[in-house]
Image (tube, helix red, strand yellow):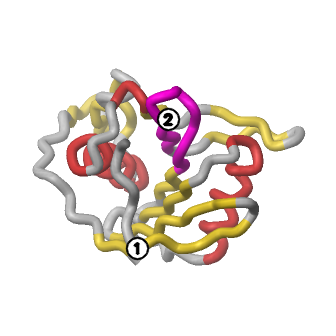
Amino acid sequence: MIKIEYPPYQPKIKSESGKEFIFDAIRKKWIMLTPEEWVRQNFLQYLVQVKKYPASLIAVEKEIELGDLKKRFDIVVYNAGHQPCMIVECKEMDVLLDKKVLEQVLRYNISLQVPCLAITNGSYCYAFSVMAGAVSELSELPSFG
């Protein structure tokens, strides 16, 4: 398990019709602020500021097809060659990062076939290497490059 040390971050938040919204700098739009969205936005800042992934190589909440099903992943990170290299699944802070969450991100990887998977609930993260069908836990989330 990796303890996430978040960088200083002042999110843009606004209220509208009694609901709170947070500005997503990656998608360049206002998103309803839910507990999961709070985790996603902070983790995006961690990827960009700490792990040095260029924002231009990160996709948020894109749709993928799994057979006849359409699903949305939370975060996909691309390498310099614009190939998907990491999938991140975000959960609310009170959600346990268990086998069920790992299985969810593994299902997404059937479509994308990335070498790195991560699951986070904001406070903690698990990262996994996926090579030749074998999944092994990583001691830290890889940095860009």
| Number of on-image labels | 2
Q: Position of residue 132 (x, y in %)?
A: 73, 60
What kind of secondary structure does the magenta stretch mostly adopt?
strand
Q: Closer to the camera, 6 or 22?
A: 6
User: Which residue is label 2 attached to?
Assistant: 78
Left or right placement of residue 96 versus residue 25 in this view? right
Please say if 124 is above or below 119. below
Seen from the viewer's position, the closer of residues 37 and 87 is 87
Kindly check if marks 1 and 2 are in contact, taking CB atoms under 8 A apart as contact.
no
Query: Split into 4 quadrants, where in the image is the C terminus?
Result: top left
Q: Which residue is mark 1?
A: 139
Q: Is residue 20 above or below residue 50?
A: above
Q: Position of residue 59 (x, y in %)?
A: 48, 32
Magenta-drawn stretch contains 73: no
Question: Magenta segment, which residues?
Answer: 75-87
Find the distance from the CA under tag 1 to the CA under tag 2: 21 Å
Look at the image and say whether residue 82 sits in the magenta stretch.
yes
- Residue depicted at x 35% and y 44%: 144
Q: Quadrant of residue 101?
A: bottom right
Give the quarter of the image for residue 102. bottom right
Mark 2 lies on a secondary structure that is strand
Q: Position of residue 136 (x, y in %)?
A: 59, 73
Q: Residue furthest top?
A: 28
Where 134 sits versus 20, above or below?
below
Q: Residue 65, labelled with which disc?
A: none
Crowd tier of the residue under label 2, counting other residues whose Cα lies within 10 Å: few below 14, some 14–19, many 20 or above:
many
Three-letter amino acid code at disc 1? Ser
Task: Name the residue type under label 2.
Answer: Tyr
Establish if 71 lies above or below 109: above
Location of the N terminus (image quadrant): bottom left
Determine the residue positioned at 50% across, 59% down.
Answer: 118
Local SS, label 1: loop
